[in-house]
Image (cartoon, rainbow, N blue to C red):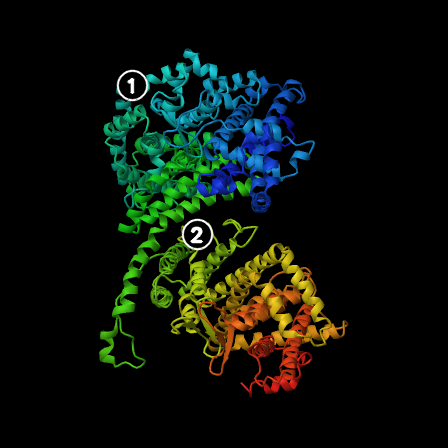
Amino acid sequence: MVDFLADNNLCGQAILRIVSRGNAIIAELLRLSDFIPPVFRLKDKNDQQKYGDIICDFSYFKGAEYYEGKLEAKAELQDLDEEFRENNTEILSRFYLAFESVHKYIVDLNRYLDDLNDGVYIQQTLETVLLNEDGKQLLCEALYLYGVMLLVIDQKIEGEVRERMLVSYYRYSAARSSVDSNLDDICKLLRSTGFSSQPGAKRPASYPDSYFQRVPISATFISMVIGRLRSDDIYNQVSAYPLPEHRSTALANQAAMLYVCLFFSPSILHTQQAKMREIVDKYFPDNWVISIYMGITVNLVEAWEPYKAAKTALNYTLDSANIKEQATRYAASLESQRSQVQQRLKEGFLREEIILDHIPKLLNCLRDCNVAIRWLMLHSAESAYDLNNKRLRQVRDQVLSDSKYKPKILFQLLLDTAQFEFMLKEMFKQMLSEKQLKWESYKKEGSERMTELAEVFSGVKPLTRVEKNENLQAWFREISKQIESLNYEDSTAAGRKTAQLIQALIEVQEFHQLESNLQVCQFLADTRKFLHQMIRTINIKEEVLITMQIVGDLSYAWQIIDSFTSIMQESIRVSPPMVTKLRATFLKLASALDLPLLRINQANSADLLSVSQFYSGELVAYVRKVLQIIPESMFTSLAKIIKLQIHDIMEVPTRLDKDKLKDYSQLGARYEVDPKQLLEDGIRKELVKRVAYALHKGLIFNPKAKPSELMPKLKEMAATMDGFYRSFEYIQDYVSIYGLKIWQEEVSRIINYNVEQECNSFLRTKIQDWQSVHQSTHIPIPKFASVDESATFIGRLCREILRITDPKVTCYMDQMNTWYDLKSHQEVTNNRVFSEIQNTLGTFGLNGLDRLLCFMIVKELQNFLTMLQKTILRDKAAVDVFKAMVAAVNPVQGIVANSTKVYTSAVAKSQKIWGSYLESIMKVGQMQILRQQIANELNFSCKFDSKHLGAALENLNKSLLADIEAHYQDPTFPYPKEDNTLLYEITAYLEAAGIHNPLNKIYITTKRLPYFPIINFLFVIAQLPKLQYSKNQGMTCRKATDPVDWLPLVLGMLTLLKQFHSRYTQQFLALIGQFIRSIMEQCTSQKIPDMPSDVVGALMFLEDYVKYTKLSRKVVEAHVPSLIFDEFRTIL
């Protein structure tokens, strides 16, 4: 008969693929459970208020029109809904595919069962498959895995969250319009059960059996699977546990399968007492806490509470006398095994001959240890008991008191057992690999000894006092031939024959009085020894390793091992060599990976890589978590070093007298740690944690503080960061790491991640943590709760700078690069603040600040345009003013008649619209000044610290611009293609080196707007009366109560016009020029000798406009005579 799992057996391959997929689905569900967007839980009041109308549960399906109508009624809700869709579609699709695969799994299983019944697979029926060992295992696993999926979904992804996700997916995807979509069936299967995994939560009625029956499965199939699980040892595990008291451990995996499958047939749990009694007697006579899949633990006391027959049957196990008996038995076993294992771990005990002579004893020791560890770990685990339940609390308390439970002692036994197991396995593997070579060498040695003895008795080979004996000579030759003829391949016959040869050698020594000759005796003894070794070696079988693998299974502790983390870390801290024993424990835990991967591997499934990566990633993350104590201890010492570096240690002079060397020497803590990747990652993780916390705590500002806390806090932060940096530099050689490289990489990652998070508030499509290039699962950057409107420290720093340089309360003096308070005329801050930020946060900090300011400028310009379009251009009175003004100024080349009246009237009529207009323009201008200052600081430090890089970038930039200009003049010259990232990449370098002009940037895309040049012209001349010219200070504000800061006004206007087509700028400049000419013409005709202050302001505006845009002066002279431009400063 064809092997059931053979490639050409369609029946076997079909069910194997289903089971393989089942394991992969569970891994995907567990993986996704860590990525549920928190907003779907609606736990937060803010989330409820913000998203309550767009996130719905299944009640949506009862009134979809009502919900959609509510959204359509409010534009802001539609906008929020669209933003929510953009941010969550990807993750929702991933969850939906996982949910769909669960439904597809059970549909495929049902189809397979139908095919079996319909005779699609020739000569195979449900009964014949269940008679086959592999078939029986796979059918049982298929039903069990479906049950595990349902339990995992309900435990890890709450019912309400599932419903909200499915409704959101339905609303946002095209699935509803697809004919073959099975969304309805998925919703029916996964609708909320009312179950909550929170401690103390009430269990819903008929849970989980009603949940398990949502998709009907053949009752015959369920009954036969449960029958097989009840009666058979489907995995032949009992052979690995010969002792009857170990039977429940031997059948533990099968017991977990039976537990899950029984929910598909709840009548057994409810009413069939005989069956339940049989099940409990066989599987649960001494245990009630089980692991159902990859360490997910279940307490039968709680799980079977609603089922009468199950509860009654379990009462015998839960009898306090039985609990006491089991607890004391395992406690005694723990004590006795501890001393045995420690004895066997002593140096030199585990030798090859001892292992070969005592294989059964050593295996029994391993069994006893593992069974005791399993029982005590599961039955004492706090996570397995709901402590709000009085009955469960009593049971746990009794277990702890009767077993005198001490987690440290249990953990010590686990460590010792893992180490013992590891050493035994490694030695056994080596012996197995060398088995044939050793056997052949022993055979050769034995045969040669017999040949030599034959020659001794021939009388040819001289040996003291040995007479010639032809009979013995022939006999020894025959024995030599017999040894030579032993066949390694036929181990049973060879073993029997070897034993007979040993006996023959003992007899020949006795009957022929050979004892008198010591040398002959020695030859015989050696040969017997070699033959004994051959028997031992032939008994080295792979079955022993398989038994060790089965006995050493630790998959049940996949989750509860976490409760021992603090003990592990304390052990490492006290005794670092403990890490070697922990290694064995982690390797033992890694054996749990075999469980989900076995079937996936057998099916040659493409899921093997992703599933193994997920589980091994989980294990590695746990190992990292435990070993994090090493860098933590290191950084504790580092904190002391920081204190010494900053306060106590004197700088070592360049030249030093030999006799003074001792005064300058410092002794530091040294770490004898293997400098592998794990340690480096641990150090990085601890560095990130501490630096991120220092930045979070150090950069919190009080907005009411006078003067601002900005500079003191930056200085303090700079000292802290310098202390970190110097100490890190100090210890790098002790642990053999590249300290500067790690420092640069991690600090830049922290700052870039925080900038990214801060910029998220300006983006519609947010960058989630799992999408971020800066965030890492192994070395995570911590997130802190926001203390104000900013999400991170970089946002707080940026907003504090904006607050203290606010144009409404300060005046910026460009010549001094300084901001002064409008009322007190005291200096508020100056460009040194950016040098201080450079000292504190480095280049990446300044660069991040610059990027954040870009986002703020974009947001401000977008808000400005919205205000312009929705408020100003919809104000009929304002639009009438603009129309009248357009008529009055045409043609622009001419002069406006009665200009003072025309302009004054237009400004007066439009006065009310300029308040918010001015605020936006000045905010943009203020941020542009800050960007300029940052660019200057970056460029200065680049030239100072990396002059070659700075020069190379400048030259490359100039040559690229020259090539691009040449291309536009003659298109035959080359130009970078669309897929060439050169321009994009060099821009990032140029901005980091401060080689760019923020004023030339295009921040937003714009459309044509009516009256735009006129509106801006009116706005500028409306502000001129609020300003006055001073020889020392330039243009300043007339009244502190009506503040206008000159440079932010000019740069804000310049930036705004830069976003539009250049013809708007031309028209705007022409209007300003016409204004100057018209007013000057009127002054001349009325014989007013002094130049009006508004004209001075307009000329200053044009002069500064030309200066900052780096335009040619001819652009302005086209609208204002050069004479006026040349003379106006001389008459001021």
Reading the image, the residue beneath label 1 is 319
**Left or right for 1053, reference 272:** right
Q: Are marks 1 and 2 in contact (CB under 8 Å)?
A: no
Task: Report the front residue among 247 and 699.
Answer: 699
- Residue 525, by quadrant, is top left
Q: Residue at x 63, y 65 (%)?
A: 1015
**Left or right for 200, reference 1045:** left
Task: Report the front residue among 1045 and 330.
Answer: 1045
Element carrying mark 1:
loop
Q: CA distance from mark 1 to mark 2?
A: 48 Å
Q: Outermost residue, front direction?
A: 1086
> Dividing the image into 4 quarters, which one contains the N terminus?
top right
- Residue 873, by quadrant, is bottom right
Identify residue type, mark 1: Asp
Reading the image, the residue beneath label 2 is 780
Q: Residue at x 29, y 34 (%)?
A: 513
